[in-house]
Amino acid sequence: MLTQRKRRCARCGAQSAKTRCFPANLKKYHQFVWVKSLGLSKVEALRELEVFRERVANKEDIRWCEAHFGADGLPIERKVSSRMGQTKKILKDSSFRFSQVSYQSESDTEEEEEEDTTVHSSYFLTAKPMIDMLFRRCQECGALIDPISVQWRQKASALWVTYSCTGCKKHFRWDSQPKRGRGKSRVYEMNQALPVSAFITGLPIMRLIDQCDLLSIAIPKERSMRDTIRFYACISIDRVYLRWERLARDLSKDVAPEEGIVVALDGQFAHPGWTSNNGKVTVFDCALGLAIAAVSLSTKDEEIGGVSCRIETVGSEKALVELVDDGFSIRSPVTDSNASVDKRIRENPKLKGIESKRDFWHAQKSLRKAWWAVKGMKSYPRFSEWYKSFFNHLFYVNKRFPNREDRPLALEYVRSFIKHCTGQHRWRKVDKW
């Protein structure tokens, strides 16, 4: 009569006829429950778990006897005291000596982020050896897959695998990413999302390539990513921007007063200095704080003529003409101290009658420099006390008397501040000051 085969327990070493096989699937919870019952610390448990997984990957038969399982079918946890006793015995018998360096190196390996049972993200970083485990058995019938039939192919950041099953006699294909698009323009999702996300967030393409090369992460080539930005991202961003710009313009027209709106405009360049090749001018509705126009220009444009300082002047004129053609009534544009912008606005017949104004920050910027440029100004503490009060008074006067016809009265208020500070409380009004 045949007797039941006895197998060796990998935990205690005893021979037993009733054993249970270590979970061979990739469910981390089941495998971790087995390893956790050994009474190890979290760091040691993670290390032991990797050892068990490596042994399972090598098709090693790992079994525990029934003595290590309870009535509920779960492994019985070993007492911590017995584990600590064994650890002390090992430390005593070995030449190991406790040091602060070894303690820090062990604690540093512990993951800081806790496990989350809820999956929030759509993509995760996965190493190729972990993917290899998915193609040892057929995903349909569970039969072993002939390693010769497994073919790996890569398309930038995407990976697809084809294999033939000897059990169900079928051919299968597995893709690591879904595809987007229609017909021949279908592309893998991340091959398009990576350059677009870098473009939107302002991350340089070369910096992204260097980082991924260092981590051995597959991404598209530089030329492919720049083509994606040019032919897909820019077109989509323009479409979205024009839609929002139309909504902002309609809102600005609905709440605009009869005398017209006041707009603020300024230029932005690709990089500071006089060597910028690209720039744009943005126009804001001062009452709403919404961008209602934007013009992008390059030094390669015919009207710029290779001179980068013309980008702001030409762009300001173009943006205002575009708003006037769209039916806007502009009362005054507020700009910085750029005489070229004012000149082009005065010479354009469509912008005739529009008076440019200066925002207060640029208006008092030159005056602040002139204040401290006076010889000996910093040596007098009294002038330092007047500095803040004087410019606060300028701001108040500028806000209270914004119109041109009120400028004589505004200048008189400024003179009164200086007269009172110097002890002159009576003076004769003159036309020029």
Image (cartoon, helix red, strand yellow):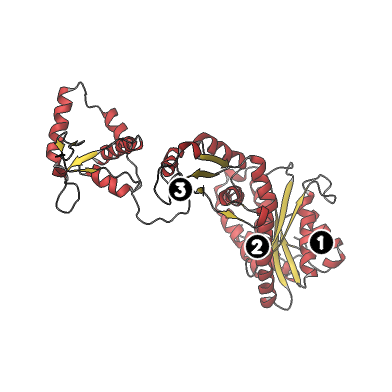
Image coordinates for residue 151, horizontal then vertical, percent: 53, 39
Image coordinates for residue 407, horizontal then vertical, percent: 73, 67
Crowd class of label 2 (few under 14; some 14 to 19; many from 20; radius 10 Å): few
Crowd class of label 3 (few under 14; some 14 to 19; many from 20; radius 10 Å): few
Above or below for 331 versus 11: below
The residues bearing labels 3 and 2 have C-alpha atoms spaced at a distance of: 29 Å
Q: Which residue is mark 2?
A: 240
Quadrant of the frame with the C terminus: bottom right
Q: Nearer the viewer, mark 1 or mark 2?
A: 2
The amino acid type, in three-letter code, at marker 3 is: Phe
In this orientation, which residue lies closer to the viewer: 192 or 65?
65
Q: Which residue is mark 1?
A: 345
Instruction: Give the mark nearest the N terminus, 3 or 2.
Output: 3
Residue 319 — which label? none
| Residue under the image location 52 percent in, 34 percent down | 214
Q: Nearer the viewer, mark 3 or mark 1?
A: 3
The amino acid type, in three-letter code, at marker 1 is: Ile
Q: Quadrant of residue 7?
A: top left
Q: Which residue is mark 3?
A: 124
Image coordinates for residue 116, horizontal then vertical, percent: 35, 53
> Along the horizontal axis of the image, is 388 left or right of 116?
right
In this orientation, which residue lies closer to the viewer: 396 or 276?
276
Quadrant of the frame with the N terminus: top left
The residues bearing labels 1 and 2 have C-alpha atoms spaced at a distance of: 30 Å
